[in-house]
Image (cartoon, grey):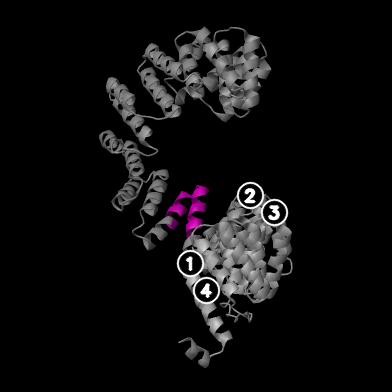
Amino acid sequence: MCTHIKSSMDMTQFKYILLCSLLLTACAHAPQQPKAAVQDDQAEAESQAEPQAEVPQVLPNVELSGELLYEFMLTEIASQRGNDALAVTGSVDLAKKTQDPRLAMRAAHLALQFGQIDKALEALRIWRNTDPASIMARRMLSSVLLRSGNTEAAGNEFADLLKVDEKHAAQNFIQIFQMLAAYPNKAEALKLLRGLAQPYPRVAEARWGVAQLAQASGDAELALNEAKQAHSLRPEWDRAASLEAQLLQKNAPQQGLEVLRSYLSSYPDAHEIRLQYARTLLDQKQYKLARDEFQRIADENPENPDLAYAIALISLQLSDWENAEIQLKQALSKGKKEQDTVQYYLGQLSEAKKKEEEAIAYYREVKGGEFQVAAHIRIAYLLSKRGQLAEARQLLHQVHVTNDLPRAQLSMVEAQLLREASQFDDAYQVLSQALARLPDQIDLIYETAMMADKIGKFDEFEKLMRKLIKIKPDHAQAYNALGYSMLERNDRIPEAVELVEKALQLAPDDVAIMDSVGWGYYLSGKLDESVKMLRRAFAGDANPEIAAHLGEVLWVRGDKEEAKKIWQNSLKENSGNKPLQAVIQKFDP
């Protein structure tokens, strides 16, 4: 048999065939190259470039000696048995000896598989040098250099790749960007890509990649300029238009909308851009237009439950109860995963329509998810509203929670229901017991303190408020509540004024705190300062309590006609407000 073979072909041809056979066998049994190692090299082409032509490899004329064959078989067995050191070292040695690009590629794959980066770089350089036309070899070498932190060498390889394959510059820039996007030092990645892009000012993909990295690095101006250039160079490219609109969203939202609107006028079937347009309209609270866009997308995707759900929520914002109900029920029937969420919003919708029994039925269908606790709270509220306070409290006690925040929330809701039923002592007991279990829960401390103040436990109130201030020194409402309570009781007025002034420093636009400060100035005899502060508060919120305070200070200062005008105007809108009625009765019976 061997004699016959030798007579029909020379030994070199025979050895070459044998080597190819062994390589094919090895590749068939080799583990797949890890995705992390090659994902950058398999990025989807973003340009319309022609496919790269296959360039035949120039293979070395190496005699297949017994020693080479032995080494090759040894590395394959070592690889299959998990002996990574022997497999990698042997395969790299074979690549060096033979200068065969196929063996170099195999060695690189093994080295990457076993995490031996230095050996992988050695094999990749052999592969690139022995097969200079291989774009894959250059991409993989660049990627591994970058991931090993050698950005200078990676940059040189990227530059060479772009020169060698200039015909596909757009495609290559997308893939280079994808590699650089994963690099931890975003500023360094941006610098590298800007350098690579400089010789290619007319390649939109290069400008787009720079814009992306500039955004990641916090250079908003550069990002926007580059995105605009990319869009200008390729007006039909949806990703360029999308990025420009996204970058405009923060400081020029209307311009961002116009970019998307203009793109859709030319390319009305661009689904992703239309979805971005709809979401942008929603972000800008242009609910009617947003709903129209989501509806158009939904008409093209009638089986998508998420779109029906989005339209329902927008309809709720527009108080379009009928359409909201139709869309929510469609989302439910189409099998939206978060059915608990849909049931919760159906309950909200029924509440808005004053259908309380129906609302309770929907809320009871919320068996889990992020709205489970909220659904139980709504049921408890509706039961309490119907006079079933005991049932409401029992329901709240049955809710199973696994962390402190919802546990505190349930106690505060129970206390609120008791407060609304004028059972103030019971409300305080509920909060105190909850606070004993969760002593550092901020909202619970505040609510317990306020209830203590309500039932006349002023020492306990002050103790809790000071504890809260110690835990959270920037809690403006704690300073305000403590200071205003003192003012109401005419107790330690200078200290009270300091407290409410501190609150105003922390929350300078809070009208309730302005009212407290104005009232503190009044009790301190600073009438002009009081009027000035109370006018600010009243301009921000013309509520009857502020009207009562402002009118009283004006009256005492001598501006009785203005005081009466403010009182009477407020009384028309708030005829049942007791503090307002009391101050009018006191000064102008």
- Can residue 558 be spotted in the picture? no
Label 1 secondary element: loop
Do the numbered discs 2 and 1 sit on residues whose CB atoms are within 8 Å?
no
Q: Residue at label 1?
A: 268
Name the image quarter holding residue 472: top right
Give the numbered dot on residue 221. Answer: 3
Relative to 235, residue 465 above or below: above
Quarter of the picture holding the N terminus: bottom left
Chain part drawn in magenta: 274-293
Label 4 secondary element: helix
Question: Between marks 3 and 4, how big is the CA–CA gap?
Answer: 53 Å
Q: Earlier in the sequence, mark 1 or mark 4?
A: 4
Front position in the image: 389 or 147: 147
Q: Earlier in the sequence, mark 4 or mark 2?
A: 4
Q: Earlier in the sequence, mark 3 or mark 4?
A: 4
* Amino acid under disc 3: Glu
Where is residue 48 drawn, in percent x and y?
Answer: 56, 74
Q: Residues within 10 Å of mark 2 (few under 14, many from 20)?
A: few
Question: Between marks 1 and 4, how big is the CA–CA gap?
Answer: 51 Å
Foreground tag (4 vs 2) = 4
Front position in the image: 56 or 453: 56
**Residue, x 61% and y 29% (percent of image)?**
509
Label 2 secondary element: loop
**Residue, x 41% and y 60% (percent of image)?**
296
Give the numbered dot on residue 23. Answer: 4
Q: Residue at label 2?
A: 251
